[in-house]
Image (cartoon, rainbow, N blue to C red):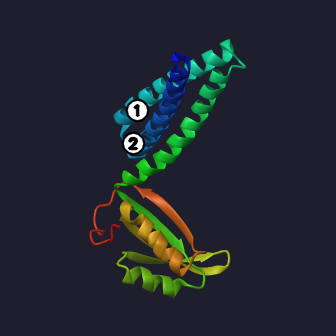
């Protein structure tokens, strides 16, 4: 009776360790982008430690019992734990979405309609005249709080689902976006 219980605990522990490692990776990447060296370094240490322990357990089982069902389950938990952690990491990243994003939009044929929609929705819009391969273009540039990014992208897609959109991580803003919609 202890065998199946211990197997389930061992497999769950490997899965949770990899899920945790993936979440630590996500937060570490966010801290790195924001220039937080000490925090990112400490998370890197924790992330690597979790990986090392989980890897050693799985490899130890695979090497000592290569065709064992428990070893295969632990290997599967190792792989799926990372995938589940990646999924949850996206949620964490979205919830940690502090700061600003700079969004550049190029619309072909719907520039005026897009401009009116974005301005009427309260987005702080700057227009830049440019030349592309196909001739003159207008680039709309918007700096907004990251938590308002989903709303902005929905507004763009409603008017021009084919618009070319680039999203840049903005490290700092000094003035000018206080009235931007936030979400």
Side of 171 relative to 159 (left or right): left
C-alpha span from label 1 to label 2? 9 Å
- Give me the residue at 43% from left, 71% from top: 152
Which quadrant, please, contains the C terminus?
Answer: bottom left
Residues marked 1 and 2 touching at CB (< 8 Å): yes
- Mark 1 Cα within 10 Å, few/some/many (few <14, many 20+)? many
Answer above or below: position of 116 versus 20: below
Whether residue 49 can be seen here: yes
- The count of marks equals 2
Closer-to-camera residue (26/101): 26
User: Mark 1 or mark 2: which is in front?
Assistant: 1
Counting residues from the N terminus, which is met first, the one under dot 1 or under dot 2? Answer: 2
Return the residue at label 1. Answer: 43
- Give me the residue at 60% from left, 85% from top: 109
Answer above or below: position of 98 versus 34: below
Side of 71 relative to 121 (left or right): right
- Give me the residue at 49% from left, 25% from top: 9
Return the residue at label 2. Answer: 31
Closer-to-camera residue (89/103): 89
As drawn, the residue found furthest toward the top would be 64
């Amino acid at each position: 009776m202890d065998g199946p219980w211990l197997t389930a605990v061992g497999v769950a522990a490997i899965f949770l360790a990899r899920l945790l490692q993936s979440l630590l990776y996500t937060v570490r990447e966010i801290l790195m982008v924001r220039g937080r060296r000490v925090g990112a370094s400490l998370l890197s240490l924790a992330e690597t430690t979790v990986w090392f322990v989980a890897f050693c357990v799985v490899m130890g089982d695979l090497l000592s019992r290569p065709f064992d069902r428990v070893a295969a389950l632990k290997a599967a938990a190792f792989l799926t734990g990372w995938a589940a952690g990646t999924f949850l990491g996206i949620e964490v990243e979205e919830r940690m979405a502090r700061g600003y994003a700079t969004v550049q939009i190029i619309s072909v044929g719907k520039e005026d309609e897009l401009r009116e929609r974005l301005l009427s929705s309260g987005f702080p819009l700057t227009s830049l005249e440019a030349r592309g391969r196909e001739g003159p273009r207008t680039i709309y540039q918007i700096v907004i709080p990251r938590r308002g990014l989903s709303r902005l992208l929905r507004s763009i897609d409603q008017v021009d689902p084919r618009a070319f959109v680039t999203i840049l991580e903005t490290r700092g803003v000094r003035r000018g976006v206080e009235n931007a919609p936030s979400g």
